[in-house]
Image (cartoon, rainbow, N blue to C red):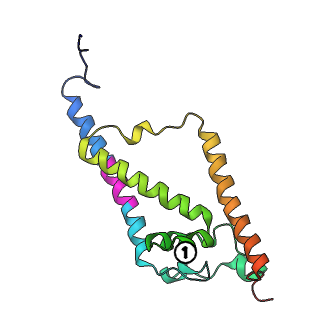
Amino acid sequence: MQLENRKPETPGLFASAQRRRRRLVGLVVALACGTLLATAAMLSPNPAGHGTHRQGGLPVCGYLVRTGYPCPSCGMTTSLAAMAHGQIGLAFRAHLFGVLVFAAVVAAMILAAVQAVTGRNVLGRIRPRRWKWWLAGAIAAWLGGWGLKVAIGVATGQYPVGV
């Protein structure tokens, strides 16, 4: 059995610079993901399924105030905070897409940490060939989560607010 001679990705002196750059990218992505997760963990999820963002000094959702129904992003912060606190049921009720975002952020943080430690191009391999389909799927999941939140809220009498 003959072993293949593996060539480095970039010959000579540039190989180490390339590896350092990959490690730096991995570190930055891991820190960004970790910051998002730490922020979610510092917030107390609102049992109402929305409004957790107000702990950060943000105003009440104007769409909710005007229409009595949540906007497409209402509940995302609550969902992320609930996931960070292990309150899976509340996370799903707050916004289904928030659960998916949380899982994606955790996965990205792990992959980025591996890249930061090893210098291997882990994040660079995540290139969906059909990015338009991934984007369309993400938007559909986001709006589908919103629609589900509104439908359940109407069925249970939670929405419209103020009626």
The disc labelled 1 sits on which kind of residue? Thr
Q: Residue at x 60, y 44 (%)?
A: 134
In the picture, measured across the screen, residue 127 lies left or right of residue 1, that is right
Q: Name the residue carrying label 1.
A: 78
Q: Residue at x 42, y 52 (%)?
A: 107
| Residue 143 to residue 131: above or below | below
The image shows residue 114 at horizontal and vertical percentages of: 30, 47
Quadrant containing the N terminus in the rendered view: top left
Q: Quadrant of residue 13?
A: top left
Nearer the observer, 1 or 23 = 1
| Residue 151 to residue 133: above or below | below
Which contiguous range is marked in magenta? 26-33
Q: Main secondary structure of the magenta part?
A: helix
The kind of secondary structure element at disc 1 is helix
User: Quick one: which residue is furthest to the top in this view?
Assistant: 2
In the picture, measured across the screen, residue 52 lies left or right of residue 109, that is right
In the picture, measured across the screen, residue 69 lies left or right of residue 127, that is right
| Residue 2 to residue 117: above or below | above
Magenta span includes 35: no
User: Quick one: which residue is furthest to the right in this view?
Assistant: 163
Nearer the observer, 105 or 13 = 105
Q: Residue at x 44, y 70 (%)?
A: 84
In the picture, measured across the screen, residue 42 lies left or right of residue 18, that is right
The image shows residue 129 at horizontal and vertical percentages of: 56, 33
**Image label count:** 1
Nearer the observer, 57 or 43 = 43
The image shows residue 133 at horizontal and vertical percentages of: 64, 41
Q: Quadrant of residue 7?
A: top left
